[in-house]
Image (cartoon, grey):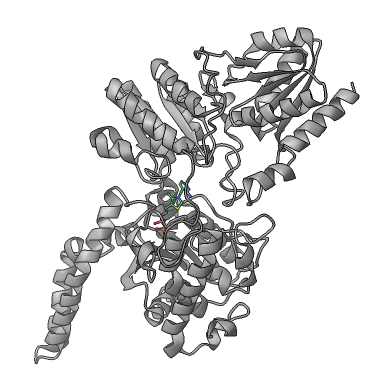
Amino acid sequence: MLLDQIQQTNDIKKIQPKDYPALAEEIRQFLIEKISVTGGHLGSNLGAVELTMALHLALNLPEDKIVWDVGHQAYTHKLLTGRREGFETLRKYGGMSGFPKRKESDCDSFDTGHSSTSISAGLGLVRARDLQGKDNTVVAVIGDGSLTGGMAYEALNNAARMESNFIIILNDNNMSISENVGGVSKYLNNIRTSNRYLGIKDGIYDAIRNTRFGEPVVNGVRRVKNSLKQLVIPGMWFEDLGITYLGPVDGHDVEGLVTAIKEAGRRKNCVLLHVMTQKGQGYAPAEKHPARFHGAEPFVIETGLPKKKKAKANYTDVFSTVMLKLAARHPEVVAITAAMPDGTGLKRFRSIYPERFFDVGIAEEHAVTFAAGLAVGGLHPVVAIYSSFLQRAYDQIIHDVCLQNLPVIFAIDRAGLVGSDGETHQGIFDLSFLSSIPNMHVMAPKNKWELSDMMKFAVRFQGPIAIRYPRGEAYDGLQEMRAPIEMGKSEMLFEESGVALLAVGSMVKTAETVREMLKAEGISCTLVNARFVKPIDTEVVDRLAQNHQMLVTLEENVASGGYGEKVRAYADENDLPVKVVSITIPDEYVEHGNVDLLKKEILIDEDSIFEKIKKELTEE
Ligand SMILES: Cc1ncc(C[n+]2csc(CCOP(=O)(O)OP(=O)(O)O)c2C)c(N)n1
């Protein structure tokens, strides 16, 4: 095995060029085998095998720096930097992260997870290098999908006309998670097609050079060509900005890539090297279904089918279905996604209402302000975004939506702990950051029927409103509890005395179990479904404070700025005669791992909550 010769960083340089294709094949087999067991980002990694090999051959790590945009394609990089064993524990609690982590290796030069940051971070590394008189190479590797994000353009604008080397590698596989969208994607497509034309042009030069007219005519043709540049030269747009464009080059030819990277490294300015790759390269199911294999669950290698059959509907499915119903009833309802039509469940909406569906690319800031424009224009937009990616659009939510009190619905998927993607993807801040915004309303459903009811409520409401729901299976308990939704009102599920549990969204299910545990110990227990985190139901807090010893709030969100803090502040301000205990995620980043395990670690699982309540009761 060639791979056995690669134990640590730069070992790849011992491999003979003739063996590069065989090594690439071994790496692919390795990745397919490992990811089929652990799950992970397969397609993007299979597409970047040769590119990563070439970077490791052309550069000298860790002195040279590679910033991986999003970071989901860095598995081969991990493999080539002494982390082969880590694949046994990939994305597991305490194991190797699925993204670059500086704490994991000195070859990971910047932590990523969210898209379109690599050029900014790389530029920072370049300026730091120059100011300190160092001469290492800095490379940002960004995909064509990530190049739809606004931050990438802000960075390009700053990198342009710089008089120092900075290599941006555009890893163009013509795909985001789904099909890439927008003008830049079209532009890159045109480059691919015009490349053939340029090949013919180069052929013409060679032919003329070999005639008796020779070099002068070649130069003449070149001049004409320059005046026609806009039409025929690939990457002219980058060139016009002041960024040298190289390519497009075959992203599966290691030796060609090494030459191109070294060439890019010789320039005294910012260079964009355009590399063409295929997502899922070398594994037929991933080539055929790039969206499914972007982030794959464990699968059977022979068939590519998931190992575990989906048993129950998840919240995304419920949202997907209710959106179709709402669209049929309300012609003003339109849907927006930032490059995640599959992940957010809007694919069915897209196929039935293509003219009312907008995939804006990885552009959450734009998505939100665009929604504000749609709302001012008389429509009722639903912006479906994962909790952690919505963080990006904070100013747009405040400045463009809430300040004007516009009817925009935020459907926030993957809220709470998401598991194996880790720190960058946990949706644990949204209750805090949304509920501090004037005019915003924030809800969380206890089960699948309530998500549907909340969406219907939101469509009738004329103002900014957010519904946050977790990743994974939708809770299908408490079906009979379906009191009509009223603004700012909680739902009483079981009314007793003693301890009152006030639970938000996903924590209602947990609280049900905790209540059973408490009752088994003879502790009488009320259970309230909070429903609203903004505004909180102060009436119920007032009432429960009168005949309960203790109020316990439960939420899958950090402590700071969350529901518990609000209830406690209200109780304090109003001198309510009751102790308030808050169960929250600690104010920390939560690493990757199985969600049930993470909950135990951070003490928000049923047993830990039960123990905490008992302890608090004895400390009364
Ligand atoms: C801000 C943000 N929004 C959405 C995502 C989800 N996401 C992860 S990868 C990806 C597509 C990236 O496409 P591209 O950059 O072309 O890389 P490829 O997977 O095709 O190699 C998206 C939308 C994210 N990571 N960050």
In the rendering, at what x and y percent does residue 360 appear?
A: 34, 42
Is 177 above or below relative to 42?
Answer: above
Depth check, front residue: 615 or 400 = 615
In the rendering, at what x and y percent does residue 155 appear?
A: 45, 52
Depth check, front residue: 592 or 435 = 592
Q: Decide if residue 207 is on the left or right side of residue 602.
A: left
Q: For residue 235, which quarter of the picture? A: bottom left
Q: Decide if residue 446 is on the left or right side of residue 408.
A: right
Q: Decide if residue 372 is on the left or right side of residue 545.
A: left
> Residue visible at 46% across and 38% down?
313
Say which quadrant the C terminus sits in.
top right
Depth check, front residue: 208 or 554 = 554
Q: For residue 204, which quarter of the picture? A: bottom left
In the rendering, at what x and y percent does residue 163 appear?
A: 45, 65
Q: Decide if residue 345 is on the left or right side of residue 307.
A: left
Q: Is residue 218 visible?
A: yes
Say which quadrant the N terminus sits in.
bottom right
> Residue visible at 42% across and 65% down?
169
In the rendering, at what x and y percent does residue 222 appear?
A: 18, 74
> Residue visible at 45% across and 21% down?
453
Q: What is the residue that sits farthest to the front in this orientation?
A: 520
Q: Is residue 406 visible?
A: no
Depth check, front residue: 268 or 49 = 49
Is 166 above or below relative to 494?
Answer: below
Q: What is the residue that sits farthest to the right in this orientation?
A: 619
Instruction: State the count of labels.
Output: 0
Is 367 above or below relative to 236?
Answer: above
